[in-house]
Image (cartoon, grey):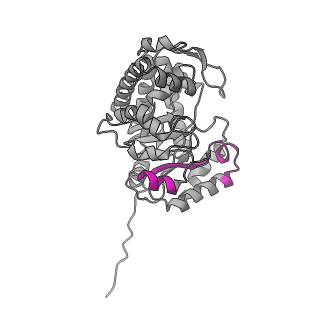
């Protein structure tokens, strides 16, 4: 009896398949990889931002793209005024805040919708260029994060005024939340696979206790996230800061959780996955290994993240936005470290 050897040609797995496996708490041929960072000059043009986003995704071989719009665009939409810094390493410069005084909360409204529409247009271009194989998710600030920007990026002031004058601040946050839901939905309609919902610092124990956050702010987060359309299959909640009230992650309806394992008082990837019951995004230090390297340190950090989690339910990524001074060779090491 003789046997004929049959060789099967397997198609390489794409980014979407890797992300889908990770979101199912599994692992495909390897963990999906992605990174993001501001490109300050290009962020003022929807077309230029889309182009550099696509170019970087292809250059580094990202499996997914966390879209990086101009951070000030959310505050601009509600009346704050910013101008370009004119330097690739410097973000937008605040000219005037929308809420300089307490009474100005009553005036908060979506007065400059183009600031958000530009981001919808840009992510649509990027998603079409990258195709279905590389999912792109839109960055969306939480209502309280936007509120902090409206007073001049002051976490303490916005929290203080919310607690002391809820009759003024809550209606403004309601209007902000409504606009954010609309922005998210339009981004998904334009081609986004979901949203990256960023809560910047407010979930830290340094800002307030978990019980206070649950009372004051969790309803806004849940309200926005629960209104995502069915087509939004890849939603991530980002808890930014140190000493996180990480138990909140269990009650934030999203497919994955992102945070910094390198910040003081925060859980490891494996701990965070267990606490939240969700897939986890992160593992790489954007202000150490990715910024300063060498590539061997990035590679070692990536492999430690995979080893700690077994690669299951892991989306390998930086803990937060990578500074624009980071070297390409360090970003490239993220994929090459685990692709072999």
Q: Which residues are magenta?
A: 270-297
- Residue 21 on the magenta segment: no
Query: Which corner quadrant of the image does residue 318 belong to?
Result: top right
Q: Nearer the viewer, residue 9 or 225?
A: 225
Query: Which corner quadrant of the image does residue 253 belong to?
Result: top left
Quadrant of the image containing the C terminus: bottom right
Side (left or right) of 179 relative to 49: left
Q: Position of residue 258 (x, y in %)?
A: 49, 44
Q: Position of residue 231 (x, y in %)?
A: 31, 39
Quadrant of the image containing the N terminus: bottom left
**Is residue 27 shown above or below 334?**
below
Q: Nearer the viewer, residue 217 or 38?
A: 217
Q: Position of residue 152 (x, y in %)?
A: 57, 20
**Is residue 238 shown above or below 310?**
above
Task: Residue at the far front: name it.
Answer: 164
Q: Residue at x 57, y 36 (%)?
A: 37
Q: Residue at x 29, y 39 (%)?
A: 230
Side (left or right) of 153 relative to 219: right
Q: Position of residue 29 (x, y in %)?
A: 45, 60
Q: Nearer the viewer, residue 247 or 240?
A: 247
Label total for image: 0
Q: Is residue 83 visible?
A: yes
Q: Nearer the viewer, residue 34 or 207?
A: 207
């Amino acid at each position: 009896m003789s046997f004929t050897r049959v060789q099967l040609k397997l198609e390489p797995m794409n980014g979407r398949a890797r992300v889908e496996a990770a979101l199912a708490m599994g692992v495909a041929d390897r963990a999906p990889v992605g990174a993001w960072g501001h490109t300050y000059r290009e962020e003022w043009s929807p077309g230029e931002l889309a182009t550099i986003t696509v170019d970087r995704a292809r250059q580094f071989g990202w499996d997914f793209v966390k879209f990086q719009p101009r951070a000030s665009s959310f505050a601009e939409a509600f009346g704050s005024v910013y101008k370009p810094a004119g330097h690739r390493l410097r973000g937008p410069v605040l000219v005037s805040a929308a809420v300089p005084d307490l009474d100005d909360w009553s005036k908060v409204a979506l007065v400059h919708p183009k600031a958000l529409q530009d981001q919808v247009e840009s992510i649509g271009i990027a998603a079409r260029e990258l195709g279905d194989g590389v999912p792109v998710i839109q960055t969306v600030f939480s209502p309280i994060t936007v509120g902090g920007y409206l007073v001049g990026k002051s976490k303490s002031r916005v929290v203080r005024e919310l607690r002391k004058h809820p009759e003024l601040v809550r209606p403004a946050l309601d209007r902000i939340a409504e606009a954010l839901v609309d922005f998210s939905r339009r981004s998904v309609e334009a081609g986004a696979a979901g949203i990256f919902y960023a809560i910047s610092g407010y979930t830290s124990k340094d800002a307030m206790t978990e019980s206070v956050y649950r009372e004051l702010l969790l309803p806004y987060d849940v309200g926005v996230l629960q209104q995502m359309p069915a087509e939004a299959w890849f939603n991530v909640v980002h808890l930014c800061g140190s000493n996180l009230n990480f138990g909140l992650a269990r009650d934030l309806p999203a497919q994955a959780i992102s945070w910094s394992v390198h910040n003081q008082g925060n859980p490891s990837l494996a701990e965070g996955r267990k606490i939240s019951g969700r897939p986890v995004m992160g593992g790489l230090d954007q202000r150490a290994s990715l910024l300063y390297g060498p590539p061997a340190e990035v590679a070692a950090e990536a492999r430690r993240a995979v080893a700690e989690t077994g690669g299951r339910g892991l989306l390998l990524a930086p803990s937060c936005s990578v500074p624009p001074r980071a070297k390409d060779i360090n970003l490239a090491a993220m994929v090459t470290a685990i692709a072999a």
